[in-house]
């Protein structure tokens, strides 16, 4: 039996709750440190702003029905912070992984996103996150849908 035969007709993936709760906790810590060490310094105000923004984005991401990825016969539907995006499978040429490198002092970390290219303009687009999966795992879910319905 082929992997495409085992595909559900549609699937919905949601952001990782553990990841976004962790972001809320770290953002609260930033906010507390910024307020506790408030000596009128602009850097403390900046820390508070980043902490507050992190809390806001996390709450909005975890809000019911605010963010998801739906895969079905007609294409991919992505909802990111209440904004919707739609892509037909026939318009997607291929998928790949985009690595974004972050550097903070001596530390370096990489974030991987699943990207795809469109036939209409040959531009690369990326999904906003991996929806609780590793980038390779998400690609293993997306490719059979594109192959079957594209």
Image (cartoon, rainbow, N blue to C red):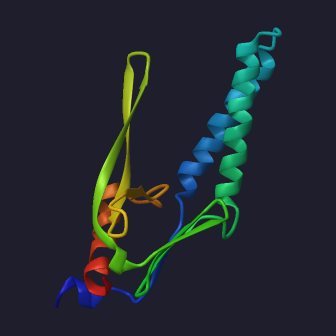
Q: Quadrant of the C terminus?
A: bottom left
The x, y position of residue 116, in whole percent, is: 34, 62
The residue furthest left is 1
What residue is drawn where x is 69% and y is 24%? Answer: 47
Residue nearer the viewer, 143 or 140: 143
**Please, is residue 140 above or below residue 60 in the view?**
below
What residue is drawn where x is 38% and y is 16%? Answer: 106
Q: Quadrant of the N terminus?
A: bottom left
What residue is drawn where x is 18% and y is 87%? Answer: 2
**Please, is residue 26 above or below residue 128 in the view?**
above
Q: How many marks?
A: 0
**Please, is residue 120 above or below residue 3 in the view?**
above
The residue furthest front is 121
What residue is drawn where x is 36% and y is 78%? Answer: 89
The x, y position of residue 79, in whole percent, is: 58, 67
Q: Is residue 114 left or right of residue 66?
A: left
Residue nearer the viewer, 29 or 140: 140
The x, y position of residue 30, in whole percent, is: 68, 28
Q: Is residue 135 left or right of residue 43?
A: left
Q: Quadrant of residue 96?
A: bottom left
Q: Is residue 36 left or right of residue 29?
A: right
The x, y position of residue 55, in whole percent, is: 71, 43
């Amino acid at each position: 039996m082929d992997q495409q035969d085992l595909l559900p007709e549609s699937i919905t993936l949601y952001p990782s709750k553990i990841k976004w709760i962790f972001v809320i906790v770290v953002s609260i810590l930033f906010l507390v440190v910024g307020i506790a060490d408030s000596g009128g310094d602009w850097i403390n105000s900046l820390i508070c702003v980043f902490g507050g923004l992190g809390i806001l984005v996390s709450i909005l991401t975890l809000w019911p029905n605010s963010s998801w990825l739906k895969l079905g016969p007609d294409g991919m539907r992505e909802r990111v912070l209440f904004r919707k995006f739609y892509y037909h499978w026939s318009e997607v040429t291929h998928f790949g992984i985009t690595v974004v490198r972050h550097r903070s002092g001596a530390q370096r970390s990489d974030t991987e996103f699943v990207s795809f290219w469109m036939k209409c303009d040959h531009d690369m687009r990326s999904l906003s996150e991996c929806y609780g999966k590793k980038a390779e795992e998400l690609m293993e879910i997306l490719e059979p849908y594109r192959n079957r319905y594209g």
